[in-house]
Image (cartoon, rainbow, N blue to C red):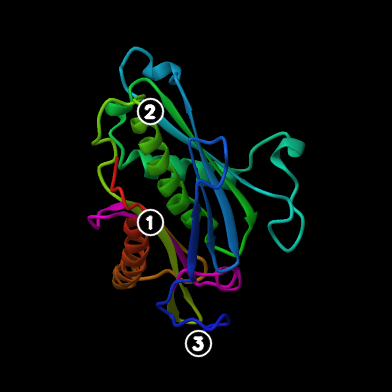
Amino acid sequence: MRSDGRRPDELRPISVVRNYLKYAEGSVFIEAGNNRIVCAISVEDRVPQFLRNTGQGWITAEYAMLPRATTTRNIRDAVKGQIGGRTHEIQRLIGRALRSVVNLEKLGERTILVDCDVIQADGGTRTLATTGAFIALVDALWNLLDRGTLPERGIVRDYLAAVSVGIVNGEMLLDLNFEEDSVAQVDMNVVMTGSGKLVEVQGTAEKEPFSRETLNALLDLAQRGIQEILTLERKLLDRGLP
């Protein structure tokens, strides 16, 4: 048993509150173990310069961690005057993941901005933020369809979820918390679609290199966890995909 009582292949309990914010087109408050994240969707009737006059939309993400989301206080990016490399990496991950399952042509020339704010962190915030952002995005698109802003369904092609896996003390674990992540020999983040296709795999050997067989086993473990998350998403999103 792990420090929080879970089996090696067990997810932390996930809780989702939809429509968490009053003014956002879509929003969720998502929890998993001791992680707490707010994901909010905003829609703008314009696109980046490189997409103007193409008829295609865009999705981009911002990610931030509140100063006391962790055991010691972090300095805000606004105070530092620059966005850190880790933040850039996570923002790009979330944006890429969402774009992979959305028909951007059906958005028209609109930009969907996804804000993911971590108010409490305990390992795996980038994967939980990706899952939360997808749920908030689906709600936002239904909102636009109901208002007649978007003309037709078929915007989201598939479900999407993400989870972390890794090796700690020689054992493969699903959904690493901070205590496990900080000592992992292998740390991996996996994003997959509802049909089982891979969107992103971020895998790193922190100490010893690992084999192709180990990679495949970790991906299998991640897929089992993601299937559980997808089951939750399908239950929550009872209207289906917009």
- Amino acid carrying label 2: it is Arg
Q: Is residue 130 above or below residue 4?
A: above
- In the image, the segment drawn in magenta is 174-201
Between 217 and 32, which is closer to the camera in this rendering? Answer: 32
Residue to which mark 1 is pinned = 236
Contact check, label 2 and label 3, Cβ < 8 Å: no
Residue 21 % position (x, y)? 57, 43
Marks 1/2: CA–CA distance:
21 Å
Question: Of tags 2 and 3, which is closer to the observer?
Answer: 2
Residue to which mark 3 is pinned = 1
Residue 136 % position (x, y)? 45, 45
Contact check, label 1 and label 3, Cβ < 8 Å: no
Quarter of the rendering occupied by the C terminus: top left
Q: At x 58% / y 48%, what residue is drawn?
A: 86
Q: Which residue, as the protein is rendered here, is positioned at the far top? A: 53
Residue to which mark 2 is pinned = 147
- Amino acid carrying label 3: it is Met
Left or right of residue 218, residue 87 in this image: right
Q: At x 53% / y 72%, what residue is drawn?
A: 184
Q: Secondary structure at mark 3?
A: loop
Residue 73 is covered by the magenta coloring? no
Q: Residues within 10 Å of mark 2 (few under 14, many from 20)?
A: few
